[in-house]
Image (tube, helix red, strand yellow):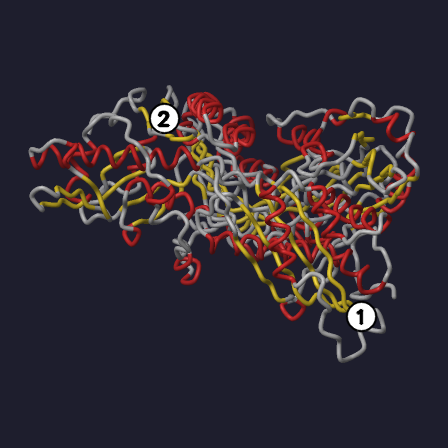
């Protein structure tokens, strides 16, 4: 099979608003994705950079998005298989190789703007997909895996199906128009003859790009929308799935690291010889200004030696940072003389000044760690060139990160190797939550490999390093102020937030593309800046702060705290105006029928307005609600709690109702929502990172705890897709949980909780 580096055109068809538009992505001079994809299974025939088929009919779909547990290794194959008319029982997945042909993230992010069907949306998506390989950015974040790939992956399936039909027409000596497909077979109804995809794969793979074919209507779907079992479940049960921590290679050595406990501290001295006295230790050396690595013949020896390594760290020249002292000043900065106003409606000031009265509340949230179940780590092999030219060196990285592209870029920057000499293999990940978007652990693995040339190195952080060297959700404080007229209607809404921004800090560490200046970071005023509510005239402002604590993308990013601020405050305004919280939100959603439908179903399923069953032990019970649009999906959640006479808090039930417009796999959606709920409850109840004398206080599950299985509430999830382009799901279930929780506590006790965590000791004020 002769393949051209430039000749592959991935094409398909999108139908929306009555317009058919060819979706495509030309493979530029970026390597041949088909060759790379086929290299791992030479027995399969590659029809397309995303599809290969064996003679026995087995279909393998390339998955370029990172699998963090969110089910993308099933969702992407489902989208391709639907239009391919595949027999789902014959479909498998494979993590895609690194190639620009798989780049989609920039397109995915921009796709948010064009969620509704029609001419403008179709044209825009077509243009974005044409430009996608120019960026070639493979990145998983922002809950973008499905909504960013939905149109394209369906077109991939349609393209491969067209190639198989062409092969069948040639084999059967009939016209293509006489053929149809069903469950991995091409059928000729006129003669009753049929050929399997496996029988046609070799011939189909020899063709060039197929003619564009119409895609199915939603009414014809047989795979999309079905609760198909996850393709990766068997390998996660039997242990055959390869996570980053599972990489084992011949001649491999193992590494551990010790970082300066104080942020921005530096290594001043260490005793490498002391480390070498541990059995199995090969070497110890400094790899970054703030870290020392120990390399050994096994992980245990590396970690034992690293823990005992005599090392001294010099503190930074700036005063030691204390998070408690620093955040205590935040409320005083709401009315700083030079706020960064990111949005202000014309007439806002006059509307606020004319208010008959105001409702005001101040909220606070702490630093949070990610606490992925699999600690940070990465494997790398550095092979210097015989001519000692850095650009000719070969680098291979086994990367449990959220970006193959950034992994490659960081390896190239560190080693000087040419792009064609850097190979990246993706692995499964034991959680990501935004932490694995940072590349510090990748850089460290490559730096260690450069010190041990010719031998693959696996770096695994200890849990303590993972907790104390995280990239944390920043601590913030916010003030909401609503102006009300004499009738109680809102006439003005003011929001100001104080804290460190994420985008700028992330970009400085990773030298990436998310270079938003702190005073221009509109993400800090999400979701209000693109609100689904009929809010009055608004002003949204930020007073950005700086501190040495590295800020990172924590699951749902700014929505994780701003969702709390907004939805807790709406309950306070509802009370001030004498309205029920659900009824108040209904008035704000009167022109948003889809949002209103989700809110109403959540309230109905929770039995809103009916009394809760009394607690037999004399505790007080309450319900709270929150409703948000997040990552292009709509969610409403109700939390039910019981507060015992001594203040002991129990979360009894969480009802979630979500509209992601089109549900590719309802089971995966429910799992994402329920995982988000537990994650969000853990953070809201207990999550807090403290920094004293420049160092993180917490270090493990013992002092940075998660919700226990015995504490988990009853989870009830309702997936109610109302049609349209799919929204995101991985982070959607997080932002509404904390506000629904504190609103429930207020309903039970009459006490407002405006500062998280709610109950680090399991007790609330009564």
Q: Label 1: which residue?
A: 620
**Picture quarter with the N terminus:** top left
Query: Which residue sits at x=73%, y=61%?
Result: 623
Q: Nearer the viewer, residue 252 or 225?
A: 225
Query: Which residue sits at x=38%, y=26%?
Result: 23
Query: Which residue sits at x=77%, y=45%?
Result: 565
Q: Nearer the viewer, residue 354 or 331?
A: 354
**Picture quarter with the C terminus:** bottom right
Q: Are marks 1 and 2 in contact (CB under 8 Å)?
A: no
- Which mark is in front, 1 or 2? 2
Q: Quadrant of residue 620?
A: bottom right
Residue 247 in picture, x, y percent from top left: 45, 49
Q: Quadrant of residue 628?
A: top right
Count of marks, rendered view: 2
Residue 504 in picture, x, y percent from top left: 70, 29
Residue 69 in picture, x, y percent from top left: 51, 51
Local secondary structure at mark 1: strand
| Alpha-carbon span between mark 1 and mark 2 | 58 Å
Q: Nearer the viewer, residue 710 or 35?
A: 710
Local secondary structure at mark 2: strand
Q: Label 2: which residue?
A: 20
């Amino acid at each position: 099979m002769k393949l051209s580096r430039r000749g592959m055109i991935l094409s398909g068809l999108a139908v929306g608003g009555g317009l058919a538009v060819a979706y495509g992505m030309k493979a530029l001079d970026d390597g041949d994705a088909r060759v790379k994809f086929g290299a791992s299974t030479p027995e399969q025939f590659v029809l397309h950079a995303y599809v290969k088929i064996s003679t026995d009919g087995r279909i393998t779909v390339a998955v370029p998005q990172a699998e963090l547990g969110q089910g993308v290794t099933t969702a992407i194959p489902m989208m391709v298989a639907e239009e391919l008319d595949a027999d789902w029982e014959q479909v498998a997945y494979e993590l895609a190789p690194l190639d620009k042909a798989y780049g989609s993230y920039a397109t995915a992010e921009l796709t948010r703007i064009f969620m509704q069907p029609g001419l403008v949306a179709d044209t825009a998506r077509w243009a974005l997909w044409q430009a996608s390989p120019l960026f070639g950015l493979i990145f998983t974040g922002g809950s973008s895996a499905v909504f960013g790939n939905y149109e394209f992956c369906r077109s991939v399936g349609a393209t491969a199906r067209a190639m198989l039909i062409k092969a069948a027409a040639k084999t059967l000596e009939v016209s293509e128009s006489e053929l149809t497909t069903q469950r991995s077979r091409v059928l000729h109804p006129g003669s009753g003859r049929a050929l399997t995809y496996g029988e046609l794969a070799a011939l189909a793979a020899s063709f060039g790009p197929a003619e564009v074919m119409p895609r199915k209507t939603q009414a014809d779907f047989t795979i999309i929308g079905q609760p198909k079992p996850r393709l990766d479940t068997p390998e996660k049960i039997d242990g055959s799935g390869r996570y980053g921590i599972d990489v084992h290679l011949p001649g491999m050595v193992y590494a551990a690291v010790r970082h300066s406990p104080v942020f921005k501290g530096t290594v001043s001295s260490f005793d490498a010889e002391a480390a070498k006295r541990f059995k199995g230790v090969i070497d110890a050396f400094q790899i970054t200004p703030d870290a020392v690595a120990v390399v050994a013949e096994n992980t245990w020896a590396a970690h034992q030696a690293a823990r005992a390594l005599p090392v001294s760290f010099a503190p930074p020249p700036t005063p030691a940072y204390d998070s408690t002292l620093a955040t205590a000043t935040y409320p005083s900065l709401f009315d700083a003389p030079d706020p960064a106003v990111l949005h202000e409606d014309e007439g806002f000031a006059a509307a606020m000044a004319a208010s008959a009265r105001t409702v005001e509340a101040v909220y606070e949230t702490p630093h949070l760690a990610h606490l992925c179940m699999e600690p940070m780590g990465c494997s790398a092999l550095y092979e210097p060139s015989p001519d000692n030219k850095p650009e000719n060196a070969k680098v291979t990285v086994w990367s449990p990160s959220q970006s193959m592209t950034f992994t490659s870029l960081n390896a190239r920057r560190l080693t000087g190797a040419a792009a064609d000499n850097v190979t990246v293999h993706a692995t499964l990940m034991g959680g990501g939550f935004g932490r694995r978007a940072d590349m510090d652990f990748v850089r460290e693995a490559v730096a260690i490999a450069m010190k041990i040339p010719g031998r693959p190195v696996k770096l695994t952080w200890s849990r303590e390093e993972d907790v104390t060297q995280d990239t944390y959700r920043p601590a913030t404080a916010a003030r909401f102020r609503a102006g009300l007229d004499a009738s109680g209607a809102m006439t003005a809404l003011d929001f100001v937030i104080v804290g460190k921004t994420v985008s700028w800090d992330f970009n400085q560490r990773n030298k990436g593309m998310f270079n938003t200046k702190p005073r221009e970071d509109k993400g800090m005023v999400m979701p209000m800046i693109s609100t689904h509510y009929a809010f009055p005239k608004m002003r949204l402002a930020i007073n950005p702060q700086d501190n040495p604590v590295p800020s990172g993308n924590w699951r749902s990013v700014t929505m994780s705290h701003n969702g709390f601020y907004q939805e807790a405050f709406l309950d306070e305004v509802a009370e001030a105006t004498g309205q029920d919280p659900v009824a108040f939100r209904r008035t704000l959603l009167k022109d948003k029928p889809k949002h209103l439908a989700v809110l109403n179903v959540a309230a109905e399923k929770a039995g809103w307005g009916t009394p809760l069953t009394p607690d037999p032990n004399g505790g007080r019970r309450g319900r709270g609600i929150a409703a948000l649009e997040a990552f292009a999906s709509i969610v409403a959640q109700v939390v039910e709690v019981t507060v015992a006479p001594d203040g002991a808090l129990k979360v009894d039930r969480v009802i979630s109702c979500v509209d992601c417009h089109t549900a590719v796999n309802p089971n995966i959606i429910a799992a994402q929502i329920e995982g988000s709920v537990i994650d969000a409850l853990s953070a809201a109840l207990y999550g807090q990172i403290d920094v004293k004398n420049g160092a993180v206080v917490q270090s493990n599950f013992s002092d940075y705890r998660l919700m226990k299985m015995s504490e988990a509430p009853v989870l009830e999830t309702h997936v109610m897709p109302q049609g349209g382009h799919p929204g995101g799901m991985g982070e959607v279930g997080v932002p509404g949980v904390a506000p629904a929780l504190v609103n429930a506590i207020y309903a039970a006790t009459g006490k407002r909780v405006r500062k998280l965590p709610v109950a680090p000791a399991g007790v609330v004020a009564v």
